[in-house]
Amino acid sequence: MGNKDKAADKGFRSSVKQYVEAQQLSEDGLARIEALLAGKVVDERIRSDEPPQTAIAGSANTVSARSGITKALYAIAASVLLLVAGYQLSSHIDLQRLFNGDSNTLAAHSMSWKIADEVARNHVKMKPLEVQTRQLSELRAYFTQLDFTPVNSSFLNNSASKMLGGRYCSIQGLTAAQIRFSDNDKQHVTLYEVQYDPSLYGVLPILERGEQPTELVVRGVAVSIWVEKGLLMATARSVD
């Protein structure tokens, strides 16, 4: 065996020894493993008072047995190491998938809270309307700085709500329309509309798919968030 082979063999045995020790075997078990790694196979016939020729034959058998045990040990160690590596890789992939999944869910939830908080603050401030009208056509004529057209929402019961007018606002940095209504109880309901950008707002429930709006209560304000007709919409009304 050359020097390179001896070095490789020594390094491999050292790795196997460290792995075995990590398994918390008994002292007797560790001693046996160490003996196998060192090639210390004891032949009882050599230790007896047998004739020299018998001892030589026994020595040859010992070498053969040692070689077989060493090969078997290598095969077992390699299998164990492969199993450990495979398990670790599988666990890493599962954890990564789980982490990514949870991360996406948390990100969407966090963005919904940010939208709800911004909408609730605007609703509480109740700033003066920039345009007062009960007609959607007049409202559209006013909102010339928007990159979308304000629309009616099927989620808002327009028969029970009377449009009062609107003003510009923003939702997470994008220019939006704030439209104020008054219901039969004369309670103000604010409808917010902005161009829906999934990369900014994340995945939100789409009304046309039968998905229900996200419902949150922030700052004493009940907020509903959804996507309809390609627009992100949100309503805000004070909680009784």
Image (spheres, helix red, strand yellow):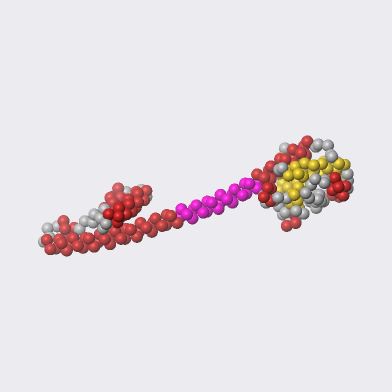
Coordinates of residue 3 in the picture (x, y in percent): 27, 54
Coordinates of residue 149 in the picture (x, y in percent): 81, 50
The magenta segment is 87-109
Left or right of residue 194, residue 72 in this image: left
Q: Is residue 37 above or below residue 178?
A: below
Camera-nearest residue between 109 and 30: 109
Is 91 contained in the magenta span?
yes
Quarter of the image with the C terminus is top right
Number of numbered discs on residues: 0
Left or right of residue 172, residue 39 in this image: left
Is 65 contained in the magenta span?
no
Camera-nearest residue between 26 and 168: 168
Quarter of the image with the N terminus is bottom left
Camera-nearest residue between 19 and 237: 19
The residue sitting at 65% across, 44% down in the picture is 110
The residue sitting at 61% across, 49% down in the picture is 104
Camera-nearest residue between 48 and 88: 88
Coordinates of residue 218 in the picture (x, y in percent): 71, 40
The residue sitting at 55% across, 53% down in the picture is 97
Coordinates of residue 40 in the picture (x, y in percent): 24, 54
Any part of residue 234 in sight: yes
Left or right of residue 180, residue 59 in this image: left
